[in-house]
Amino acid sequence: MRRLFPFLILFLAAEMTQAQQIEDAANGVKYPENLANWRIIASSYRQDNDTQRIILGNHIAIQAVRSATFEHWPKGSILAKLVWKNTQHAQWQSAIVPGKLVHTEIMVKDDNKYKVTGGWGYARWKGSDLQPYGKNADFAQECYSCHTQVIKNDYVFTSAAELPGK
Amino acid sequence: MRRLFPFLILFLAAEMTQAQQIEDAANGVKYPENLANWRIIASSYRQDNDTQRIILGNHIAIQAVRSATFEHWPKGSILAKLVWKNTQHAQWQSAIVPGKLVHTEIMVKDDNKYKVTGGWGYARWKGSDLQPYGKNADFAQECYSCHTQVIKNDYVFTSAAELPGK
């Protein structure tokens, strides 16, 4: 352990540096560090802006949505959406695969904290270097106003995809 | 512990029953139990058969593909592809989301064991009840013959999608 100590310090310092490099959204929503390791909820693609997506959930969200009695997203649920530009597969022309990473979006559930945006905190980080979207906290109104279309689904567009063995 | 013992037995029995319900593919490839909890490699959608997909990897595959020096899939890598029929989102017409689960496919890397199919063991289970595809082991030739188009990419169509923070 004694010998490992300097390496542990270096490792923690590197982790902290990485964490510091990703700016919070202007409404205070933090980028969840481990997001690319989260489990899947669904995929989708959009014909209007030529993108495809994978929607992931943190532990709270996955536990909720995969339970047989799922009804609502509990406090602390985070949904993450990775959005890529559509690109044609070089060896299979009818297959459309992820090109450039456009942005990473999250929704964090907290009815009190995010009361003005329907109980969800919204954030988006642009590109692979995760630049926060929006000049000030008002950006979240843009997200919210669009998500009001699915108010009956607790402002969430995503439904869980059917998983094997269910 | 003593009181928990009967429940533990019941739990294990239930788990074993579930495992037994999923038949091996005709070439002996086993369905990986925990597949829906694996981490993402990419997404895709196909215009020729109107489906969309999420491609996941087991621990060995993810560790390899996410390393800075990734060159080949090591022995024990498993790639899994969940395939859904495309369906229009009810509240957002240009968004195409997962409908019915069509099938779950895997590729298992073992150069010796699966020599006749290019070092990969192929399998497909149909529908949400995971019925193995193919009447006998020859079904894998069908997979293999199509995958020879990407022999230069070690028979793998999927490239890892760009992840945030990379």
Image (tube, coloured by chain):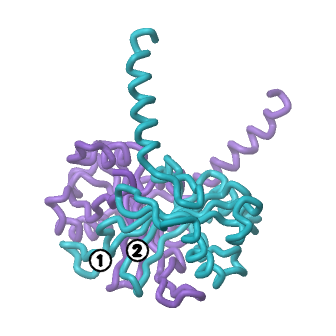
Chain colours: A purple, B cyan
Percent across and percent down for residue B163 are 56, 66
Q: Does residue A27 show up?
A: no
What is the chain letter for disc 2? Answer: B
Name the mark on residue B52: 2
Label 2 sits on a secondary structure element that is: strand
Percent across and percent down for residue B120 are 66, 66
- Residue at point 46% right, 65% down? B133
Outermost residue toward the left in this view? A152
Name the quadrant containing residue B91.
Answer: bottom left
Give the residue type that dot 2 points to. Gln
Percent across and percent down for residue A87 are 51, 85
Number of numbered markers = 2
Depth check: A39 or B14 in front? B14
Outermost residue toward the front in this view? B136
Q: Is residue A5 left or right of residue B159?
A: right
- Residue at point 46% right, 71% down? A103
Q: Nearer the viewer, mark 1 or mark 2?
A: 2
Label 1 sits on a secondary structure element that is: strand
Q: Is residue B87 left or right of residue A125?
A: left
Which quadrant, please, contains the C terminus of chain B? bottom right
Same-subunit check for callouts 1 and 2? yes
- Residue at point 54% right, 63% down? B123
Percent across and percent down for residue A83 are 44, 72
Outermost residue toward the top in this view? B2
Give the residue type that dot 1 points to. Ala
- Residue at point 25% right, 60% down? A156
